[in-house]
Image (tube, rainbow, N blue to C red):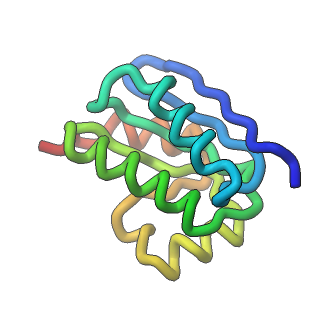
Amino acid sequence: MPPLTLAHQHLPGVIVIAVTGEMDATNRAQLETYLRKSRTDPSERLVFDLSRVPFMDSSGLHVLLTCFTDCLRNGGAVHLAGVQPLPARLFEITGVVAHIPVHDTVEDAITAALTSERSI
């Protein structure tokens, strides 16, 4: 299995976090550590580019949900982009799609994140 690769870009009003590789129990800690280091403000709007994530298990999902909850609690937002078929099925089965916006492209997710109302 290829290693998880993470990168982020701070744009005005949003951080785009690009994830490459499988998100599972073997790299959960790596993802959590990366998110703690790359986020500077808990009220940020985040876009996760998942276009290069072919597989995600419940560990990866848990990290995304924890991040979503933290952002929501602090007035931020999380948007997902480019979700591949297997992770999309996981989001559908678990009901995540009812709570976290999913977009076809990173550009669509950025636009939505910047135009959405901040949570209170």
Please give the count of numbered marks on the rendered protein: 0
Q: Position of residue 57 (x, y in %)?
A: 63, 67
The residue depicted at 44 percent of the width and 68 percent of the height is 97
The residue depicted at 60 percent of the width and 54 percent of the height is 104
Q: Quadrant of the C terminus?
A: top left
The residue depicted at 51 percent of the width and 19 percent of the height is 10
Location of residue 18 (image quadrant): top right
In the foreground, 97 or 106: 97
| Vertical side of 57 occupied by 16: above or below | above
Q: Residue furthest toward the bottom?
A: 93
Q: Is residue 11 left or right of residue 51?
A: left
Q: Position of residue 89 (x, y in %)?
A: 61, 76
Location of residue 20 (image quadrant): top right
In the foreground, 22 or 84: 22
Q: Quadrant of the N terminus?
A: bottom right
| Vertical side of 88 occupied by 10: above or below | above
| Vertical side of 90 occupied by 26: above or below | above
Q: Is residue 105 left or right of residue 12?
A: right
In the foreground, 119 or 115: 119
Q: Position of residue 70 (x, y in %)?
A: 30, 44
Q: Residue furthest toward the left?
A: 120
Q: Position of residue 44 (x, y in %)?
A: 34, 30
